[in-house]
Image (tube, rainbow, N blue to C red):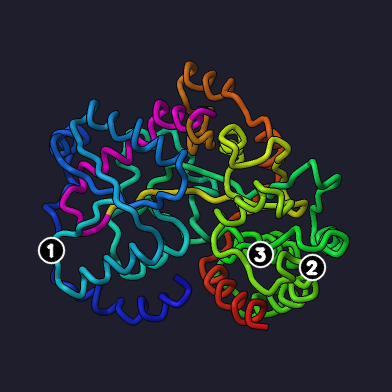
């Protein structure tokens, strides 16, 4: 994705001048008319499929429910990030009239890039009946990687980065950069950073620790990035000889890091979301001694959204699916520990009393701090340019050194 931005921006003019014909405008339809138009349609939802727990929720709850409630056939296709953007750019170049993708699970860089090429339909979120339960002034929902959403994507899940450690092997977990340096020097080979999204998110948390919580919020600041990333690379290079494999190589996926954490080769892993840890302990993916915690200076919290494609032929049906994902029923099902155990994007105070009590009494993780204590450590996502630069510079300044 990080190499993709230049090519993408070079094609903005092409996309803006495209003569692709849109589906008949649905902007003036009532919600009742939208649901009528949605009936019997097939919606292609492109999404990341790397979590078996999310997949179970989608395949065994969402798909049958939207079929039963709205007679919509929801089909899932695998894709994320630059794959989604590539497909849409190819369609624009080819002058394709109707996109093969109706909606996509997006956030961050992908949202930013799709907005740059005018590939998203909207604004539409204020037209969803269940949007009344969402606090769109919450900065974790209003802004996606510091870019205002403005109704062009609908939230459906929210999650926070956490560090995992094996309490059987680690007596006191490091919670800041100084403590991590002391730990790796005393316990070489038991820590590393995955060279992918979750790992780069950890590096963003370290940038915030160096710069201060709000210094990097807002639009991308090249001067600030150069200042604090220089400090970051000096720190990482100083301690990487004490990493797994002496810092000569880094796991390319969080799955590979999780596997080494499970076998005891590593004493640490990292992830977004805490409640799914319970399922992973039960199925043996994590040891029973695994525990999650937040970095002292805070950890990144971000929201997952669904966006509807501007050239979707099934916008009405996609809106109905997005609205269902925001329903108290769907959000509560997703919250169950037997599902993904993830937090709701709904403002619980806005819910009817019955649903408010259900969410308040929902079980919490046995392997992570209480949700409210994690909330106090939540940091906003930085602008997408920070992630793009971190990927590039981690390769140049750390891996290739």
Q: Main secondary structure of the magenta part?
A: helix
Above or below 245: residue 108: above
Describe the element under mark 2 as helix, strand or loop. Answer: helix
Q: Which residue is mark 2?
A: 242
| Residue 128 screen position, x and y as percent | 31, 38
- Tell whether 230 sits left or right of 6: right
Q: Quadrant of residue 352?
A: top left
Residue located 29% across and 66% down the image: 118
Magenta segment: 309-338
Give the total number of marks visible in the rendering.
3
Pointer 3 with pointer 1, Cβ within 8 A: no
Q: Which residue is mark 1?
A: 97
Query: Which one is closest to the eye, mark 2 or mark 1?
Result: 2
- Tell whether 124 sits left or right of 245: left
| Residue 34 screen position, x and y as percent | 18, 38
Q: Which residue is mark 3?
A: 203
């Amino acid at each position: 994705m990080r190499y993709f931005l230049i090519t993408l921006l070079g094609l903005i003019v092409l996309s803006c001048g495209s003569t692709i014909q849109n589906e008949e405008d649905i902007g003036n339809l009532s919600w009742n008319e939208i649901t009528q138009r949605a009936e019997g349609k097939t919606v292609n939802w492109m999404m990341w499929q790397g979590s078996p727990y999310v997949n179970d929720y989608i395949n065994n709850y969402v798909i049958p429910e939207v079929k039963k409630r709205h007679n919509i056939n929801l089909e899932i296709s695998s894709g994320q990030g630059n794959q989604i953007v590539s497909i849409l750019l190819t369609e624009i170049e080819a002058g394709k009239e109707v996109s093969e993708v109706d909606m996509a699970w997006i956030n961050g860089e992908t949202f930013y890039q799709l907005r740059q090429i005018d590939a998203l339909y909207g604004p539409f979120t204020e037209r969803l009946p269940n949007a009344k339960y969402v606090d769109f002034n919450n900065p974790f929902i209003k802004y996606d990687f510091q870019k205002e959403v403005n109704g062009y994507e609908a939230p459906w899940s929210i999650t926070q980065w956490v560090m995992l450690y094996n309490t059987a092997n680690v007596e006191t977990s490091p919670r800041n950069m100084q403590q991590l340096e002391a730990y790796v020097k005393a316990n070489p080979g038991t820590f590393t950073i995955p060279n992918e999204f979750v790992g780069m998110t950890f590096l963003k948390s370290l940038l915030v620790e160096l710069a201060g919580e709000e210094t990097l919020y807002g639009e991308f600041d090249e001067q600030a990035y150069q200042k604090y990333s220089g400090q970051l690379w000096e720190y990482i290079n100083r301690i990487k000889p004490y990493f797994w494999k002496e810092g000569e190589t880094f796991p390319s996926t969080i799955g590979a890091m999780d596997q080494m954490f499970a076998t005891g080769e590593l004493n640490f892993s990292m992830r977004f979301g805490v409640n799914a840890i319970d399922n992973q302990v039960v199925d043996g993916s994590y040891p029973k001694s695994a525990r999650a915690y937040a970095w002292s200076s805070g950890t990144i919290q971000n929201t997952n959204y669904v966006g509807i494609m501007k050239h979707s032929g099934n916008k009405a049906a996609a809106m109905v699916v997005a609205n269902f994902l925001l329903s108290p029923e769907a959000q509560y099902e997703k919250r169950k520990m037997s599902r993904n155990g993830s937090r709701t994007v709904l403002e619980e105070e806005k819910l009817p009393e019955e649903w408010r009590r259900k969410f308040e009494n929902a079980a919490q993780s046995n392997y992570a701090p209480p949700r409210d204590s994690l909330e106090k450590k939540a940091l906003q996502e930085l602008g997408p340019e920070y992630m793009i630069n971190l990927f590039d510079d981690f390769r140049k300044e750390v891996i290739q050194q």
